[in-house]
Amino acid sequence: MSEFTDNERKQLLKHFSNIDKKVFAIITPQQVDRGALMSRYSRTDKSMRKIFLDEFLKNKNRGEEFYTRVLLEYGDDSVAELGGGQIAIEGLSNIAVKKIEDRRIGLSYLEKSSRYVSWNKKINGKYKFYREPDIMKSSYADNYLDACNFDFDVYSKNIKPMLNLIREKDSIENYKFKDHTGKEKKFNQLKDNNTIKSAQRIYNAATKAKALDALRSLLPASTLTNVGITGNGRAFEYLLSIMYGSNLSEERNLASQMKKELDTTIKSFVRRTNDKYGKILQKYLDDIKKTSTKLSKSHVNGRPTRGIFVKLVSYEAEYSGINKVISALIYEQSPGIEFSQIHKNVKKITQKQKMKIINTYANIRKNRRHRPPRSFEMIDYTFDLLTNYGMFRDFHRHRALTLERQLLTTDHSYHTPKEIVELGIEKEFSECMDNTKNVFQKIRKKLPEQAQYIVNFAYNYPYFMKLNLREATHLIELRTIPQGHTDYRKVAQKMYKLIKQKHPVLSKIMKYVDLEEYELERFESEKRTEEKRKKL
């Protein structure tokens, strides 16, 4: 006999995917009710569906009242993770989007790609870059506009020539494609019209990506992009509080706009972003920044480094690292034995045996998506990096690590892609960079943070990363795949070589690092994409 009456069953089916199974989805329309139900669920022996009938069905404000009490009166932040939302932001700068994506827990991002989408189109006769209000009100407004427009002019007019250069250098005739029988054949050997069109799609997509990859160096950080964000209420609230406290008007305005839109779906979860609680958090973060600035001025001196480098600046001796990793590997399967005792036993294992153990776990991995066990998180590395800003944007997407960065400047020189030289526009490229530097130096005197908007992706950018061996394996294997951008592939390969040099045994777990070079990076990936498209 059912726990519920026929009428109750009818009502419940509007809010739950089923009413008689132990596993069910919560589909009640209001996000606030979903989260409140989850939280209330943890403090009663009633079933969730029974809680809904008794406490929520007749009180439409039950969820809202619950969160008001728990979040504001009791400050139990964890319950704010039980509600989530999605938000899209269109037309924000590359400065603002990086500030948003600095948040590493509770939020997921999907950003407009600079390799698949070109930025040559105008809206109402204007290129799509951010007109920073403080700069536009200053005496530097014309300089700023001229510099950004010049960058976009050079970028736009060279898309077709760059594409032609790449296709002339590396003709479609050099590549093999699957014919209608599934056999790999040179392009000129293909006979079937559908197969020929498919091959052209693959080649055109790969060459377009390479052309845009080369030209993106010209784009300034003011370039407008789009980003979609999915996350829980707690993470959104923290993000908004940080943005409200920003020195940049774009970020403060975005916070207000995001708050207004999130109020339509998860209002209860983000209500503290700019109230007294939010302002206390903002002051705390500002105090940290001011204190760190004072410390820097008192204790740091030197000149900005120019060029590009990848340095491994912190790591431990491999023998101690191996002992910790092996101890962690067998901990779960050694019930009743404390970690310290296991560690003592592991130390007694011969070095040859330890090498064999690490190799065994490396051999178990059959592809790069087989992440190493968490035991490999016992080892940390700190890298000091100076790479072009465009490349940094790709590394910035990795969040299971510690990444700290500085303001974007022109102090560290810039990187010229080899394709720019081959196309014969190095002089014009240099003019863009030099013009940027001159205008940047003028703006930074009064508006140091706002000056970032004018800096091109080609300019080198300093940051450091602290990450464990498990995350290093993921990052390096992913960023060395053939379809990756040449810039970050070289950096990831260098990181691998540095780790291997210091930890030749432990680095065996990085089984799928690709150290090769490729002329047309996206080709094989586009082939796989085309095969999937055909099956749809």
Image (spheres, rainbow, N blue to C red):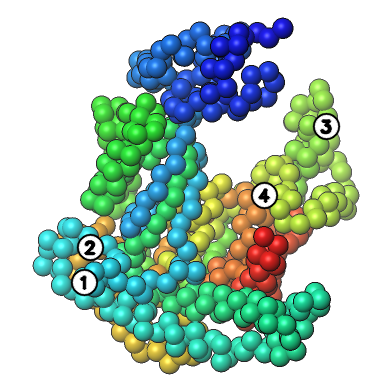
- Residue at 74% from the left image edge and 51% from the top image edge: 370
Would residue 451 appear left or right of 372 to someone viewing this image? left
Q: Nearer the viewer, mark 4 or mark 2?
A: 2
Q: Is residue 199 visible?
A: no
Q: Secondary structure at mark 1?
A: helix
Disc 2/disc 1 C-alpha distance (Å)? 8 Å
Quick one: label 3, few (<14), some, or many (20+) residues within 10 Å? Answer: few
Marks 1 and 3, the one that precedes in the sequence: 1
Going by the numbered disc 4, the residue's amino acid type is: Arg
Helix, strand or loop status at disc 4? helix
- CA separation, marks 1 and 4? 45 Å
> Which residue is tagged 2?
131
Q: CA distance from mark 1 to mark 3?
A: 64 Å
Marks 2/1 in contact by CB < 8 Å: the verdict is yes
- The residue indicated by pointer 1 is 145
Mark positioned earlier in the residue sequence (3 or 2): 2
Q: Nearer the viewer, mark 1 or mark 3?
A: 1
Q: Which mark is residue 333?
A: 3
**49 up-or-down from 312: above or below:** above
Element type where label 3 sits in the image: loop
Residue 349 figure quarter: top right
The CA distance from mark 3 to mark 4 is 20 Å
Q: Is residue 150 visible?
A: yes
Q: Pick whichever of labels 1 and 4 is earlier in the sequence.
A: 1
Q: Quadrant of residue 503?
A: bottom right
Crowding at dot 2, Cα within 10 Å, few <14 / some 14-19 / many 20+, comes out as some
Label 1 vs label 4, nearer the camera: 1
Disc with the residue nearer the chain's start (3 vs 4): 3
Q: Are marks 3 and 4 in contact (CB under 8 Å)?
A: no
User: Are the residues flagged by discs 1 and 3 in contact, CB closer than 8 Å?
Assistant: no
